[in-house]
Structures are given as C-alpha cells and as structure tokens.
Amino acid sequence: MATSNSGERWLERDDLQQLVDALATAGYRTLGPVVRDGALVLDDVARVEDLPTGWRDSQAPGRYRLEKTDDPRVFGIVHGPDGIKRLAFREREVLLEVECEGPGKPFRARATPPEPEKIAVLGVRACDLAGLLTQDRIFLHDRYPDAYYAGRRQGLLLIAVNCTRSVSTCFCTSMGTGPEAREGYDLALTELDGGFVVRSGSPAGEDLLTALGGRPAAAAERLLEERRALDGCAAGMKRRLDTHDLPDLLYDNLRHPRWDDVAERCLSCANCTMVCPTCFCHDERDEPALDGTGTVRVREWDSCFNRDHAQIHGINFRPHVRERYRQWLVHKLASWIDQFGSSGCVGCGRCITWCPVGIDLTEEVAAIRGEPS
C-alpha cells in the first residue's frame, strides 16, 4: 500500500480477506464479531464470510434484536453483549496452585501466569477501546500492576472499526469516546461504499499495512466521505448524558428519592456490570482439593450488585438494592473520576440494552438533576 501525505490508505472490500490472511501469517489468532445465538459475540475468524456482513442490530432499553439485510457492509452491527475486556481481564482464572503431599508434609506454591498468546481483534469499536484504556489504568498503571493482566494485554493487536451508524442506546459523544477511535488501536478502519479508509496507530499496525502490499492512497473525496459519515453518526446520536457538573451532582444527592424509585425496578441481577467495558470488581478465593492434596487460588468477576460483595466480618454495609445501585452509579460517574482521572462510563449503552427492565442511567442522572422526563 502506498501511503498518502496524511497517512490514510484505501482497502477495497474485496481485499479484506488479505488482512485476515496477513494476521494469520504474522502468527495471530484472529477474533472478530460473529453472529451466534441471536447476538454479536467475539469468536475466531478465518474468513471474511465469518464476519457479520449485512447484519444490523436494533437496540433499546431492555431490548436487542438482529436482522439480516442485503447491505454489503461487513461491520454494520454496532456491538453485542461481548467486549474485549475479557481478553485481558479474564472472567475466571487461576492465580496460584498449592500442592501438598499430605498432613504435616511440605507444600509447594506455584504462580500460574498466562502463556503468551498473540491475539488480533478485528472490529473493535471506539467505546471498547476507551474501556480497555480504562482497564489499563487500573491493572497496568496504578500502584500495583497486575502481571496476569499485563501478560494477556501485551499480546493483543487491536483493529478498530469506526462507527458510521449508532443505535438508540449509544451516547459515546457525551463521554468523548467515539464514534471515531482516536487512540489505543494498531489499525483503524472506516467502512465506506466499496471499501475501507485505513490508518495505522502503532509500529505493529504499520508493519501489517506494509505486509498487505501496494494499494492507492485514499483520495481526498474518500476522506471527505469518511468525515461526513463520522460526523453524521455523531449528530444522529439522540441519547445524551450531561456531565458538566459531575461528580458534584451525585455527591450532593446521595439521599435523593430517585434512589428509592430505581430500587423498586432494579433486579440487582448484575447484567449491567457484566457487559460494562470498564467494571473491574472481582473476588479471590481458595478452592481446596477434596483429598487435601492442594488448593488453587481463583480470581473471577464479581459485581457490586451482588449482596455478598458488601459482606464483611458479619455485617453487610449495602444490604439493600437502593445502596447497591447508588454505589454503582456514583462510582461510575463520580468517584471513578477522583480515583483514575476519568469517568468510568464510555457511553456504549450496553447497560441500558442488557438491563432486563430497561433502566437507563442517563435518565437516572437527568431525574436527579431535576429535568422533566
């Protein structure tokens, strides 16, 4: 591919298989969006035909539907419940193995760091990139870096796809995270009629473009078309979250009656935290073998919506749904900023879509603000 003066390049849609093949040649296991069981999930991709060409998603509070269309675009679906967080921060993993020959005998403890694996993810959305960068701040750049997270994160190559359409639950423009990927990617694609505008964001991404061979640079009219598509996606996003006075708004309203209102609807099911790209609550526990020969220390995802999450020394300090929902929302939009310097929300809207009763955090903040519903 020949590079234009501004670094953009053009990839014909019919040549997308060359990108998939180049990833395999470079030794990557390639994951991408795949339609399965009525939803979009990340799974292995060996051919372009594995990708969701022609599929579209319809999302609303508590509602998710897919529809097959005749549109030739490959990445028309925005996202599903699955994200890239689990590729670095596993849902469940063994941290330590302890072996013992018997009572009174010596024991051996062995850490179980992940085996290095090169994984390329094709079709990452800007909101998920922002979510992973937030995870990086927690697990890589905080006081105590996590070696297990770092081992998996190091092997990830991220190929973003900028959004040219949104669904009704998206509000990434409010959070400054999309619809265009601005950082954290190795390659970024914008799908237009006939092909993709491609940019590299890292040396690994540039090497990948070089391996694809010669193609003409993106013409000026294509770049104008791309800008119109991205701006149109942003302008068409109807859901908004006013962040101008956060976190003070939430800190000043910890006794607001709206918390009781939402508690009457919330099932405390933890769906919102499971699909969230930034939630990082987890639990660690020892699981002994029944024959007493050893034990393993396990880390797995947890949620502040689980009642036991707040159980300490015989007392639960968040026994009611009201306190648990308030903890989640105030941490996400307020105290997270105090801890990490940015919001814990990236505006993907998954918590709205996948809430069984359709609770919308943008509506909850607006209600606390006193705005009419």
Image (spheres, rainbow, N blue to C red):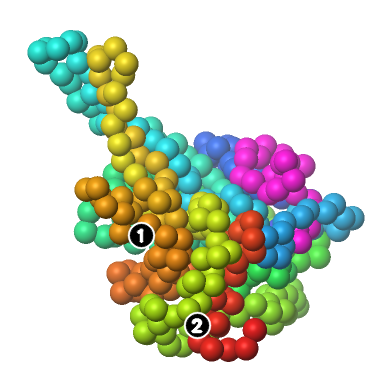
353, above or below 29, in the image: below
User: What segment carries the magenta color?
Assistant: 34-58
**Label 1 environment density (alpha carbons within 10 Å; few <14, some 14–19, many ≥20):** many
Look at discs 2 and 1 and give the one toward the viewer.
1
Disc number for residue 368? 2
**Res 189 visible:** no
* 238 left or right of 260 in image: right
> x, y (%) of residue 143?
21, 59
**Label 2 environment density (alpha carbons within 10 Å; few <14, some 14–19, many ≥20):** some
| Circle 2 SS class | helix
| Circle 1 SS class | loop
Image-quadrant location for residue 366: bottom right
Q: Which image quarter is the C terminus in?
A: bottom right
* 51 left or right of 68 in image: left
Mark earlier in primary sequence (2, 1): 1
Residue designated by label 1: 318
> x, y (%) of residue 207?
52, 52
Residue type highlighted by circle 1: Arg
Let me know if residue 211 is in the magenta part.
no
Q: How many marks?
A: 2
129, above or below 236, in the image: above
Nearest the viewer among 355 and 205 is 355
Let me know if residue 50 is in the magenta part.
yes
> x, y (%) of residue 75?
72, 57
Write the residue at 68% across / 77% down: 237
Write the residue at 39% across / 36% down: 93
Task: Give how far apart the Cα atoms at labels 2 and 1 are.
Answer: 21 Å
Write the residue at 35% across / 60% down: 318
> x, y (%) of residue 319?
38, 57
Write the residue at 61% across / 59% down: 355
Residue type highlighted by circle 2: Ile
